[in-house]
Image (spheres, rainbow, N blue to C red):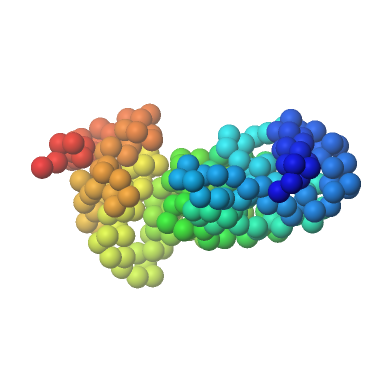
């Protein structure tokens, strides 16, 4: 990008962060290519990555002033609602809104036609719901489900959606690894009824996650420490932390 391009991008980002939708619209009217421009940066490992202005609206920590109106202004100017990030993953703006629990921006993106089940998450290449459940962004996660997001056994267990969990067993018998992972997810989400259901179906109470050295007990203590009933139930069943395993 030229110095002029950098200045335009900086002005657009400032307008987004401050909720100055009028200034953003004026910039987009004078420089239409901003709507689809890629803002290029250096990642921590020195590689080049690129995001769009819609990514900026949804970026951490999210909840920028007038975020939904900002999304609408960008989309009206031609922004690509499902444009993927370029770099170590392919997340869309919806992934980013889900990752910071910004339900207003999430709704605005979906209203503009965003793919609710778009792949590319940093969490296993999955959907926005994969990010929301992994990062314990519960408002965004339940909103995605409410708006039609597909669930897996794991994401249904994390959210305690017992009917969906039971449906997974009714349609086919999940393999042991799926059951163990779902049990870990239920504990991560603090969902005692779902954890009990999965334990009754053979889940390993001391299963160590493939993505980190943490057992279900570790998961609930970290992410859902207020779920005292679940912690007590796990300990009553003899569940251990990863540091206590041989």
Residue 107, visible in the rendered structure: no
Which x, y percent locates residue 168? Answer: 39, 64
At 77% from the left and 51% from the top, the residue drawn is: 35
Q: Residue at x 57, y 37 (%)?
A: 60
Where's residue 38, x and y in %?
68, 52
User: Which of 75/116 is in front?
Assistant: 75
Outermost residue toward the left?
A: 246
Residue ID at (59%, 53%): 85
Q: Outermost residue toward the bottom?
A: 172
Q: Residue at image x 85%, y 49%?
A: 31
Left or right, 76 with reference to 159: right
Q: Quadrant of the C terminus?
A: top left
Position above or below: 120 against 141: below
Tag count in the figure? 0
Visible in this render: residue 24?
yes
Tell me: 238 left or right of 46: left
Horizontal and vertical percent for residue 23?
84, 36
């Amino acid at each position: 990008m030229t110095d002029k391009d950098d200045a335009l991008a900086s002005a657009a980002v400032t307008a987004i962060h401050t909720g100055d939708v009028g200034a953003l619209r004026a910039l987009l009217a004078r420089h239409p290519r901003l709507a689809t421009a890629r803002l290029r940066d250096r990642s921590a490992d020195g590689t080049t990555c690129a995001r769009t202005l819609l990514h900026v609206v949804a970026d951490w920590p999210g909840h920028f002033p007038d975020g939904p109106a900002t999304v609408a202004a960008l989309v009206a100017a031609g922004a690509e609602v499902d444009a993927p990030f370029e770099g170590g993953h392919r997340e869309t703006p919806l992934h980013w809104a889900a990752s910071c629990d910004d339900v207003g921006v999430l709704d605005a993106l979906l209203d503009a036609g965003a793919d609710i089940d778009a792949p590319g998450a940093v969490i296993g290449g999955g959907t926005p719901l994969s990010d929301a459940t992994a990062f314990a962004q519960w408002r965004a996660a339940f909103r995605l489900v409410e708006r039609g997001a597909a669930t897996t056994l794991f994401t249904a267990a994390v959210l305690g959606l017992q009917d969906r969990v039971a449906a997974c067993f009714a349609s086919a018998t999940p393999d042991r690894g799926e059951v163990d992972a779902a049990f870990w997810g239920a504990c991560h989400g603090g969902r005692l009824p779902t954890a009990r259901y999965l334990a009754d179906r053979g889940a390993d109470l001391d299963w160590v996650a493939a993505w980190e050295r943490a057992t279900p007990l570790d998961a609930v203590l970290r992410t859902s420490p207020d779920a005292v009933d679940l912690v007590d139930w796990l300990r009553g069943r003899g569940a251990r932390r990863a540091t206590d395993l041989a």
